[in-house]
Amino acid sequence: MAFLLRGANRRRWEWPSAELPWLPAGEIPAAPFGDVSPSTDSALSVWLVEDDQSNLERVVGVVAAGRRHVDKFDYALVEESAIRGLGIEIQRSPEACPDEEASRRWHHNVIRLTATNLNAIVQLIRSEGRVERVLKPRVEAIIRNGMDSGQINPARLQKSLLDSLS
């Protein structure tokens, strides 16, 4: 059972209903939808994580390496089969990034999304997925290890990220 990873903001997913008295029972606040904002062609960029999660750190590294600065990294993880079970199409779609091999192997787009699909994805992440955090020192180590191993191409990193690694 493979997983799909999407960069996220953990705080958007933490809403104890007691703290949101205005939120009707069974409803979702709008905040998590910021993490599933699709492109203009209604596609959502995601990364495939193997069943045993053996490529999880590499995927975290490549996504975090695309940022402007080293920082903590939050992500949502949900079973690929659960997304497919919603009748939503997932398509392998390599993209330009600092780790081209990882992109060829694991980058996908969830395509032809509707507002109803996005709502279902947020509900699924909340009920069956998980939202995790990798702390900044570990993110830095993952990126450095990726560069040292030649998986992450430093020439494809933003200067500000390289500066924050120094």
Image (cartoon, rainbow, N blue to C red):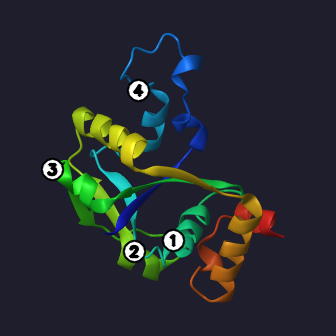
Residue carrying label 1: 56
Q: Given the image, on which type of amino acid does mark 1 rest?
A: Leu
Quarter in which the C terminus is drawn: bottom right
Residue density around tag 4, few if under 14, some if 14–19, many if 20 or more, within 10 Å: some
Quarter of the image where one finds residue 89: bottom left
74 sits left or right of 94 in the view: right
Marked residue nearer the N-terminal end (4 or 1): 4
Marked residue nearer the N-terminal end (4 or 3): 4
| Vertical side of 152 occupied by 129: above or below | above
Q: Are marks 2 and 4 in contact (CB under 8 Å)?
A: no
Q: Given the image, on which type of amino acid does mark 3 rest?
A: Gly
Marked residue nearer the N-terminal end (2 or 4): 4
Disc on res. 50? 2
Please tell me whether mark 3 sits on a helix, a strand or a loop.
loop
Please tell me whether mark 2 sits on a helix, a strand or a loop.
loop
Marked residue nearer the N-terminal end (2 or 1): 2
x and y percentages locating residue 41 in the rendered image: 27, 46
Q: Given the image, on which type of amino acid does mark 2 rest?
A: Glu
Alpha carbon distance from label 4 to label 1: 28 Å
Residue carrying label 4: 28
Q: Given the image, on which type of amino acid does mark 4 rest?
A: Ile
Q: Are marks 2 and 3 in contact (CB under 8 Å)?
A: no
Q: Are marks 2 and 1 in contact (CB under 8 Å)?
A: yes
Residue at left offset 47%, top offset 42%: 35
Residue at left offset 45%, top offset 15%: 23
The residue at the far bottom in this view is 149
Residue density around tag 3, few if under 14, some if 14–19, many if 20 or more, within 10 Å: few
Residue at left offset 37%, top offset 39%: 122
Residue carrying label 3: 87
Residue at left offset 44%, top offset 70%: 96
Alpha carbon distance from label 2 to label 3: 21 Å
Marked residue nearer the N-terminal end (3 or 1): 1
